[in-house]
Image: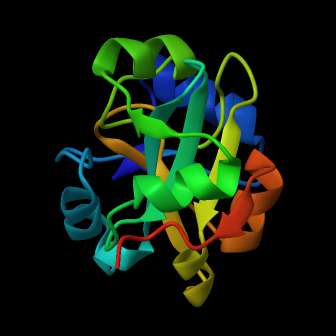
């Protein structure tokens, strides 16, 4: 692991500021299990960024624990609209990043954001840093502050 050099990871570092460090790995961190293996943490500590489209075609960001699947019906109920998983082109357009490296910050516009409440079970979590090999460490409280999202029960049971 080393300090991020890729332009997308540096963009995330700029959005985060000096209190965080985006790290790059020589191995992939695109999936929750890959990231957990690279970092040496539990899969549940990975804060995976998933992009959905709402009924009007607007983007919705759900940051879920790597151990959980998102229940689209629950998210739709919380937001008062239906949602569906977005395709790669939509994700890139909405966030500026490709699937497998979508960070919780650094998007061209502020996204409607929900945070998986189970992330609050950890003192330390890890999120994507803009590329499929970059991540950064933060607390659930910091995730909330950075994204303006709200914690909710979004996990499929």
Instruction: State the image coordinates of residue 135 (x, y, percent, origin top left).
Output: 44, 50
In the image, residue 130 above or below residue 98:
below
Instruction: State the image coordinates of residue 12 (x, y, percent, origin top left).
Output: 60, 32
Q: How many marks?
A: 0
Instruction: State the image coordinates of residue 128 (x, y, percent, origin top left).
Output: 44, 46
Instruction: State the image coordinates of residue 31 (x, y, percent, origin top left).
Output: 24, 51
Place residue 142 in its image quadrant. bottom right
Left or right: 50 with respect to 31?
Answer: right
Which residue is painted at 29% across and 36% down in the image?
132
Left or right: 67 with respect to 23?
Answer: left
Which residue is painted at 28% across and 68% down in the image?
36
Which residue is painted at 55% across and 55% down in the image?
75
73 or 39, nearer to the observer: 73
Residue 97 shows in this picture: yes
Residue 4 shows in this picture: no
Which residue is painted at 58% across and 27% down in the image?
59
Left or right: 85 with respect to 62?
Answer: left
Indicate the quadrant containing the C terminus: top left, top right, bottom left or bottom right. bottom left
Left or right: 15 with respect to 91?
Answer: right
In the image, residue 127 above or below residue 60:
below
Place residue 14 in its image quadrant. top right
In the image, residue 60 above or below residue 48:
above
């Amino acid at each position: 692991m080393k300090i991020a050099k890729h332009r997308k990871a540096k963009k995330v570092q700029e959005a985060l500021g000096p209190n965080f460090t985006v790290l790059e790995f020589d191995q992939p961190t695109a999936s929750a299990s890959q990231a957990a293996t690279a970092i040496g943490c539990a899969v549940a500590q990975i804060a995976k960024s998933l992009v959905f489209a709402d009924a009007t075609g607007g983007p919705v960001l759900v940051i879920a624990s790597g151990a959980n699947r998102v229940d689209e019906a629950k998210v739709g109920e919380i937001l008062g609209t239906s949602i569906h998983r977005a395709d790669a082109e939509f994700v890139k357009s909405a966030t500026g990043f490709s699937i497998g490296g979508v960070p919780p910050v650094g998007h061209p516009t502020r996204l409607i954001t929900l945070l998986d409440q189970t992330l609050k079970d950890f003192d330390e979590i890890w999120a994507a840093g803009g590329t499929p090999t970059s991540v950064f460490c933060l607390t659930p409280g910091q995730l909330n502050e950075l994204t303006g999202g709200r914690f909710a029960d979004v996990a499929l049971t």
